[in-house]
Amino acid sequence: MSQLNETLELMQTRRSVRDFKPDMVPEDILDKIIEAGLWAANGRNRQSPIIIKVTDKSVRDRLSRLNAEIMGTDSDPFYGAPAVLIVLADKNAPTYLYDGSLVMGNLMLAAHSLGIGSCWIHRAKEEFDGPVGKELLKELGIEGDYEGIGHCVLGYVNGEYPETKARKENRVYSID
């Protein structure tokens, strides 16, 4: 199979995972996933998105509780994933939302290619607009006007990998 076909196959088979084992993803695998995120396409090569890697369980749990509170639940919105990559982007870049979204896509596709499950978890915007998120950025020495784009939760799939579902019809239109 050619490289192009392997890439397309990964795109077609990647699914969001919502049940993770507690086993931590090895550092070298996380680094490869992060590198893929850094290579995402972005407007005018501004490279406005940043990634915060969270593997410390207490910080991960604190973020999970905050995310759950924003969502109005007491369950774990990170589905037990032991690692979280938070993508934020500099709001001064006119394409920041798109750039950060492309980073998220690269992270999830790279994770799948390495046998790691992933899921995009929302509410990063609300987290980092609030005092807890702002304090975390300050602790990390991150300055600037950043908006949370998403959390890419990562881990080993607990159980069966989600099935690939058929694509809906009538989603492509042509102007010839």
Image (tube, rainbow, N blue to C red):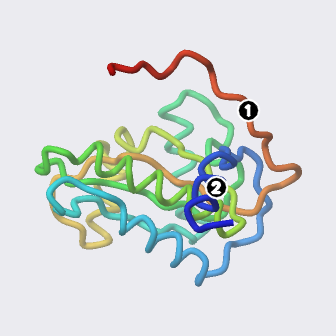
The outermost residue toward the top is 170
Give whichever of 80, 113 is nearer the camera. Answer: 113
Residue 19 percent across, percent down from the top left = 77, 48
Residue type, numbered disc 2: Leu
Q: In which quarter of the image is the N terminus?
A: bottom right
Give the class, few, some or many, for how many residues have Cα within 10 Å of label 1's Cα (few <14, many ≥20).
Answer: few
Query: Is 135 positioned to the left or the right of 156 in the image?
Result: left
Q: In which quarter of the image is the C terminus?
A: top left
Q: Is mark 1 on a helix, strand or loop?
A: loop
Q: Which residue is drawn at 64% across and 62% down?
A: 6
Q: Is mark 2 on a helix, strand or loop?
A: helix
Give whichever of 162, 86 is nearer the camera. Answer: 162
Q: Residue at x 38, y 64 (%)?
A: 51
Residue 167 percent across, percent down from the top left = 65, 27
Residue 74 percent across, percent down from the top left = 65, 35
Which label was assigned to residue 113? none
Q: Residue at x 49, y 51 (%)?
A: 151
The outermost residue toward the right is 159
The outermost residue toward the front is 176
Give whichever of 127, 162 is nearer the camera. Answer: 162
Residue labelled with disc 2: 10
Tag 2 or tag 1, which sits nearer the N-term?
2
Residue type, numbered disc 1: Lys
Q: Which residue is drawn at 50% across and 60% down?
A: 107
Which label was assigned to residue 165? 1
Q: Is residue 85 above or below residue 67?
A: below
- What is the C-alpha distance between the residues marked 1 and 2? 14 Å
Give the class, few, some or many, for how many residues have Cα within 10 Å of label 2's Cα (few <14, many ≥20).
Answer: some
Residue 116 percent across, percent down from the top left = 69, 64
